Amino acid sequence: MAVNSSPPAWKDPTKLGYGAEPAADLHRRVLLAHSDLLLEDVEMLRLHDANEAPPHLREAIRALQIRLGRRNPPLPPATLDAAHDLVFAVQQRLMAANPKNPRPNRHHGRPSGQPLITLVREDRKWKVLTLPPPTSSDEDADWIELVESTVERAWDRWCYAQQQAVRAARVRAKPHLALAVAEAAWNNYWLLLQDAQRIKERLSARPVQRAVGTVSARRP
């Protein structure tokens, strides 16, 4: 199954209308959109029982790494599982490059905001997102922007998983598995959305606590 080298017009990352923003951040978001398309291709190939990454997909992944700044990237992964992991790792690197996030991306262990792997069914794994911790700048607005960005990414991933489920049903290519993946993506988005709402409510109540002058007004 061949992978399209160019996205349809309605998916063209250069026509997503991000508005006026710094060139570096615009480039970062365009690469995020390209990586979404690659993940979509990987899922479609999986639904057609493919295990190996075709040449077109491998070349597209290599091109993405070059655009990310790697002059001599390693050979693209040969399997779809490895291709999925590599593209998702690229996404996490792009998200960590958000100019609003002053934290380094290297921590001991697995920090909050990093992807976790969950088993869907039939040995199919899906990576879910977690919300980032407060920023080192201690600015609530910066933290909320990162939280909202993570929730938005989870929404995007559910949209793509939902599209794959619809396609799988149409072509009768493991629709139950595709639906299970879409359900996992939706649960991830919904839980993050609820957690984000609780964070916003807690932060909005903080000035009231400070005005009263209670001990509970301390920053957690």
Image: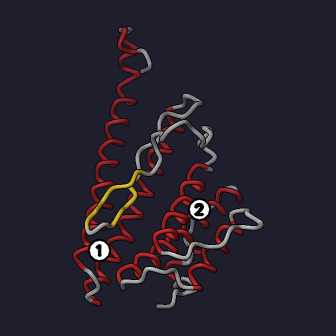
Q: Name which residue type carries label 1.
A: Ala
Is 103 drawn above or below residue 25 in the view shown?
above
Q: Name which residue type carries label 2.
A: Arg
Q: Which mark is residue 122?
A: none
Give the spatial CA distance, label 1 vs label 2: 27 Å
Q: Which residue is mark 1?
A: 178
Q: Which residue is mark 2?
A: 29
Q: Secondary structure at mark 1?
A: helix
Q: Earlier in the sequence, mark 1 or mark 2?
A: 2
Residue 98 lies, in percent from the top left, at 60, 49
| Residue at the spot 62% in from the left edge and 73% down from the top edge | 76
Q: Bin the neighbour count of mark 1 within 10 Å (Cα to Cα): few under 14, some 14-19, many 20 and up.
A: many
Residue 97 lies, in percent from the top left, at 62, 50
Is 40 drawn above or below residue 24 in the view shown?
below
| Residue at the spot 66% in from the left edge and 67% down from the top edge | 65
Q: Residue furthest left?
A: 176
Q: Quick one: 41 or 146, which is closer to the camera? A: 41
Please identify, in this view, whether the residue under mark 1 or under mark 2 is nearer the observer: 1
Residue 188 lies, in percent from the top left, at 32, 54
Q: Quadrant of residue 87?
A: bottom right
Q: Residue furthest right?
A: 71
Q: Quick one: 14 or 87, which is closer to the camera? A: 87
Is 80 drawn above or below residue 71 in the view shown?
below
From the viewer's perspective, is 181 left or right of 137? left
